[in-house]
Every structure is written in C-alpha cells, then in structure tokens.
Image (cartoon, rainbow, N blue to C red):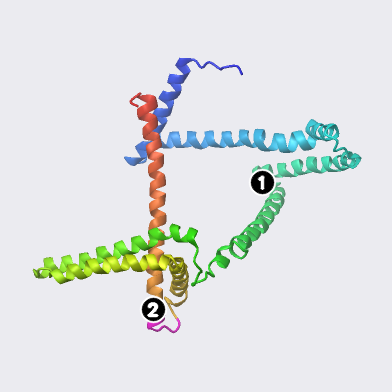
C-alpha cells in the first residue's frame, strides 16, 4: 500500500484553522457575535456538503446506481453464475426490476419541485409517501418497543418472589451493601444533628446499638442474598416506581383523591425528579466530554503540550 505524504505546511494550516474555528465557537460563551455566526454557518454548510457527498458515495451509488441501474446488477449475476448459483430467472427478474428502480429515482427528484411555486404540488406526493411509510415503520417499532416479549410494557410485569440464582445474587450484592450504607449514614446524620442542635452527648448504648444493627443487617443481607430475595426487592422497586408514576399522571390533578393516591402521586413525582436528574447529569457529562476533546485538541495537537 502506497504511503501518502502530506506537506507539513498544509498540516500546520489545518491545525491553525481548526484552532481558530474552535475558539470562534467558544466565543459564544462571552456573547453571540458576528465571528460565531460566521463559523456557525460555515459549519452547517460543510456538514450539509459532507452529507450530500456521503449519501451519494455510500448509499445511492453502490446500492442504487451500480447494483440496480448500471453494471453492478450484471456483475452480481455473473458472480452468482461463477459460484454455481446460476438461475436463469434472475436475468428475467433483473430485467423487470431495473426500469422500476430507474422510475423510483425519477420520482425521488420530485423533492426539488419545492423550489417551484407552480409545481410544488408534485413534491407533496413524494413527501406524503415518505411520511406515510415512515409512520408505518415507527408504529411497528413502537409496538416492538413496548408490547413484544422484550418490550418495555411486557418487562414491567416482574416477579416479586424468585428462586435462588447464584449468578444474579453476586450481581445484586452491591444493592444490599449500598442500602445498608445509606441507612448507616442516615442514622449517624440524625444523631449528629441532634447533638449539634441540642447539645446532647450521644450515649454509648446508642453507638453500640447502631454497630450491632449494622452487623445484623449485613448478616440478614447475606441470608437474603442466598435466597434471591434481593432480586425480588429490585423488581419490587421497579414495580413500585411504575405504579407511583402512573398515579402521579392519573391522580395528581382532578378526580377523586384520597390519602393513598396523593401519597403515591407524591412519591411518583419524586421518583420522576430523580430520573430526570440522572438523565440531565448524563447530558452534562456528555457535554463535558466534548469540551475535554476540544481542549485536548488545542493543548496537545496545536500547542504540543502533551
């Protein structure tokens, strides 16, 4: 394979342009300015041009023009003949299908009639076909996402009592340990606040009782792990979350409400906030990863500070 040599001048020029573009996009942190808007339009234009080129080279040319319209279809049939997979019906089928693929290419060009005021109705035909087929595919995907054997709704019906399973038991050990640690922190936190606010010295018997409770909790957790009940606890937590969130959307406003529905709706609201907070945290971490990537580019590649 022949090695391609790149002129160092063009390499340095690419680094300078990349650094200038990065700093120009970061200038938005100060305020929106003309430099940021210019590089934003450059980025959008380059992205659109790259998308058009990739669409032709990776999708239309190999999968439509070469295989269906031009020499690719004949080459594929000849390769089948050489491998002993010859079927004369393939030639007849290809001859019948090739005009159809050419017709679909012409129909696809109707998209560009959006640029004409008199012929814009032709583009609506293609848009309607695309939206209808896309809606059908989305409905099928939604059904598979929620109601199949591995769907979200189907997997919400979880068993609350499970037989012993050593593999799952080992994986669920962190759940028990984390719960016990949280309980210990909560107990000591309450006692500490009481000591600070009221000036009461913590009796020795309370510390002894807390330590004994921790040891008893660890022993009880080990006992439950051996019977797979911790997995049942995890399933119960999922089912409880599902029911409480449904109560929040159904009983939070309007209708007849009692203490049970109000309490379940309140708990569902808190669980939703926890879920949204975790999602927002992951989004922030993704943005930080982009920032770290750009900082590494500026420091290591542009300034050679690696």
- Quarter holding the C terminus? top left
Distance from Cα at disc 2 to Cα at disc 1: 57 Å
Check the image and report above or below for 233 versus 91.
below
Residue 76 % position (x, y): 80, 34
Q: Is residue 25 visible?
A: no
Q: Where 295 sits versus 129, above or below? A: above
Looking at the rendered image, the disc whose residue lies closer to the viewer, 2 or 1, is 2
Residue at image point 41% right, 68% down: 224
Quarter occupied by the N terminus: top right
- Where residue 12 appears, x then y in whole percent? 43, 19
213 is higher (above) or lower (below) than 69:
below
Magenta extent = 255-263
Q: In the rendered picture of this protein, how many numbered marks are placed on residues?
A: 2
**In terms of secondary structure, where does tag 2 sit?**
helix
Left or right: residue 193 versus residue 45 is left
Instruction: Using the rendered view, name the quadrant where residue 16 is placed.
Output: top left
Question: Which residue is found at the position 67% from the left and 38% from the top?
Answer: 59
Which residue matches tag 1? 117
Q: Nearer the viewer, residue 67 or 34?
A: 67
Q: Which residue is mark 2?
A: 262
Dot 1: within a 10 Å radius of its alpha carbon, few (fewer than 14), some, or many (20 or more) residues? few
For mark 1, give the secondary structure.
Answer: loop
Residue 258 lies within the magenta run: yes
Does the magenta run of residues contain 261? yes
Callout 2 crowding tier (Cα within 10 Å): few <14, some 14–19, many ≥20: some
For this view, does 258 lie left or right of residue 95? left
For the point 74% across and 38% down, the residue is 64
């Amino acid at each position: 394979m022949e090695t391609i040599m790149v002129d160092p001048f063009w390499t340095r020029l690419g680094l300078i342009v990349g650094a200038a573009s990065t700093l120009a996009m970061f200038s938005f942190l100060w305020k929106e300015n003309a430099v940021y808007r210019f590089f934003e339009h450059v980025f959008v234009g380059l992205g659109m041009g790259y998308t058009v080129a990739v669409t032709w080279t990776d999708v239309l040319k190999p999968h439509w023009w070469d295989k269906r319209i031009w020499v690719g279809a004949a080459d594929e049939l000849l390769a089948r003949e050489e491998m002993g997979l010859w079927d004369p019906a393939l030639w007849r089928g290809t001859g019948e299908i090739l005009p159809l693929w050419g017709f679909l290419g012409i129909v696809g060009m109707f998209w560009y009639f959006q640029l004409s005021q008199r012929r814009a109705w032709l583009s609506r035909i293609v848009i309607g076909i695309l939206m209808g087929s896309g809606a059908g595919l989305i409905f099928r995907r939604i059904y598979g996402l929620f109601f199949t054997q591995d769907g979200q709704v189907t997997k919400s019906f979880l068993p609350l009592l499970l037989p012993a399973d050593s593999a799952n038991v080992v994986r669920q050990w962190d759940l028990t340990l984390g719960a016990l640690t949280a309980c210990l922190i909560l107990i000591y936190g309450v006692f500490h606040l009481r000591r600070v606010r009221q000036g009461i010295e913590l009796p020795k018997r309370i510390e002894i009782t807390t330590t004994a409770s921790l040891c008893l909790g660890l022993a009880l957790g080990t006992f439950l792990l051996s019977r797979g009940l911790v997995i049942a606890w995890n399933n119960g937590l999922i089912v409880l979350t599902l029911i409480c969130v449904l109560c929040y959307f159904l009983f939070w406003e309007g209708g007849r409400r009692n203490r049970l529905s109000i309490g379940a709706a309140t708990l569902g609201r808190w669980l939703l906030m926890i879920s949204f907070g975790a999602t927002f945290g992951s989004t922030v971490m993704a943005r930080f990863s982009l920032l770290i990537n750009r900082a590494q580019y500026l420091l290591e590649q542009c300034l050679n500070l690696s």
